[in-house]
Amino acid sequence: MTAPLVVFFVLAALAVIGAVSLIFQKHPIHSALSLIVVMIALAGLYLLLGAEFVAAVQIIVYGGAIMVLFVFVIMLLNAGIEEHTSVSKMAGPPGLLLVLALAGLVAATIVRSTDSIERTLQSGDMSSTMGISNMVFKDFVYPFELTSFLILVAVLGATVLAQREKS
Amino acid sequence: MNAFLTTNAELIITLVKIVLLLFIVLTVNAYLTWFERKVVAHMQSRWGPHRVGPHGLLQPLADGVKFLFKEDPTPAGVDKFVYYLAPLLALALALTSLALIPFGPDPIKLFGHDIYLGIAPPDVNIGILALFAITAMGVYGVALAGWSSNSKYPLLGGLRSSAQMISYELALTMSVVGVLLMAGSFNLKKIIEAQAHHPEWGIFGWNIWPQLLGFFCFFVAAVAETNRVPFDLPEAESELVAGFHTEYASFKFAMFFIAEYTSMITVSCLCSIMFFGGWLSPFPASWTFTHYLPSAILLPFGLWVIWDGIRYETIFGRIILPGVGTAIAGLGAVLILLPGVNLFIQGPFWLLSKILVFLFVYVWMRGTLPRFRYDQLMAFGWKLLLPLSIVNVIATSFIILAKMTWWGAQ
């Protein structure tokens, strides 16, 4: 095994362990910490693919900003250990079906793909900062601007909803 | 053994560099506390530490020993895992961010290897982004310490700190965009080199002149990110006892302390690299006589320390101080005698001088400014710093665009 492959498996294992621990932890803060581990492992995987910019943004935005907000809200509400309710009957069979469908989808993608991991690691052309900015500000400038407009509207909506209680 | 050395040379060099940098940074941290106490004391017409060793120079050592040997109780009802994780996280992230700083332009050639000053190779394309990623994670040390202590004052401190860091991170990142636009790169080395575009301009080629607004926003936001006066609300002692580290004692407290001072050093490095030309000399490149400036500072300073030392009141001081002075003056003399070494030392000399100035500014602010109120802090971040930094980005990009279209520059 080459060194990048070893790093890949370590990071992948870390991401999976973090995701499983996110579900099984009893306390919201521990779950949030597990999610941070997943985010950082994903950033490492992006770095391994040569996508430096995406990796850094993944940590800054998800690891740094969004997860800090999660932790902040959990601390602010002083959420305790979660309480278990009786399992919903609707969640069982449809959930199992969805899990099977997802597993099938992933398996099909893996079987049909022809790229080896080594070759995927080599192709880091589109992932450079310049490549991304060219795509965002030249090729897809209108969808990009529309998306940011949508986000702006959502932010305004959230502000209006939050201020309504005052009057 | 020899084959092992040659195949893993890069790895071994990096490991040695990490150990060296850790040693240097921790020593500098220790003496930074001495520096801070001395400077603040003199600003308040006191003497500061002067009992332990000559001029109190052994005080950091005494403090370190005290931190190590104090009782380290774990309060009841803490979340053990997170309680122990928080100081580790704070310290590890603070130290990691220093690994990305380049400390000098030229490599040392040793055994056929180019050894650069600074741990990361100089061609890290996302240098500044990676640094921001690491500092963004630094919030967790403080926030989790506050939460896991299971006590009301730390919890309030942790809450304040996470809200403050989210607010000021936006201004911090927006304020450097102007510099990035001018350099056209995230690479810290390229950012410095872009400021040496006109070698004869010297100090007037630095980013501080076109980016004065950006520097103001960056420095204020960075001080807020490091939780220092006047933004030290997470540990406001008049309101929250000691804030997020109230329940931490002994070396776990020392870890938070070291983390805070290390991030001060990182911010000083970033300020000098991005706005003050990093390792560039403020003089035009043709003024080669300024290369003797390190000697011209070290020699008189060393002689002054000797002169001060022989009149010192304790015998220990009369032995130690002249020795230290001789070493400093000797270093200055060696630099005059070895032109090659002198030329190599120019870059690190200027970078370290600038870092020292910024560290002094940090201490100066602590001796001068009162603490913000919490609502003032939030209003300042969101209503002043963020709009200002956005204006700076827009203005900078318009000027660059105008330059490109009308003057055809760049």
Image (cartoon, coloured by chain):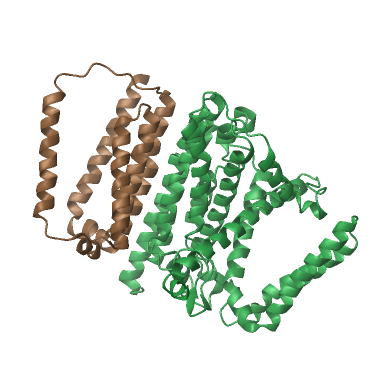
Q: Is residue B160 visible?
A: no
Q: Is residue B393 positioned above or below B240 on the image?
A: below
Q: Nearer the viewer, residue B299 or B397?
A: B299
Residue lying furthest front: B1
Q: Position of residue B160 (x, y in %)?
A: 50, 33
Q: Is residue B52 left or right of residue A10?
A: right
**Colour of the chain lettered A:** brown
Q: Is residue A62 left or right of residue A143?
A: right
Residue lying furthest top: A86
Q: Is residue B116 positioned above or below B83 on the image?
A: below
Q: Nearer the viewer, residue B7 or B388?
A: B7
Q: Is residue A83 visible?
A: yes
Q: Position of residue B211 (x, y in %)?
A: 47, 60
- Seen at 36% across and 42% down, the residue is A37
Q: Is residue A83 positioned above or below A30 on the image?
A: above
Q: Quadrant of the N terminus of chain A?
A: bottom left
Q: Nearer the viewer, residue A50 or B303?
A: A50
**Colour of the chain lettered B:** green
- Seen at 33% across and 48% down, the residue is A41
- Seen at 36% across and 60% down, the residue is B397
Q: Position of residue B269 (x, y in %)?
A: 54, 59
Q: Is residue B306 left or right of residue B384?
A: right
Q: Is residue B129 positioned above or below B233 on the image?
A: below
Q: Quadrant of the C terminus of chain A?
A: top left
Q: Position of residue B89 (x, y in %)?
A: 49, 43
Using the rendered view, name the quadrant where residue B308 is placed.
bottom right
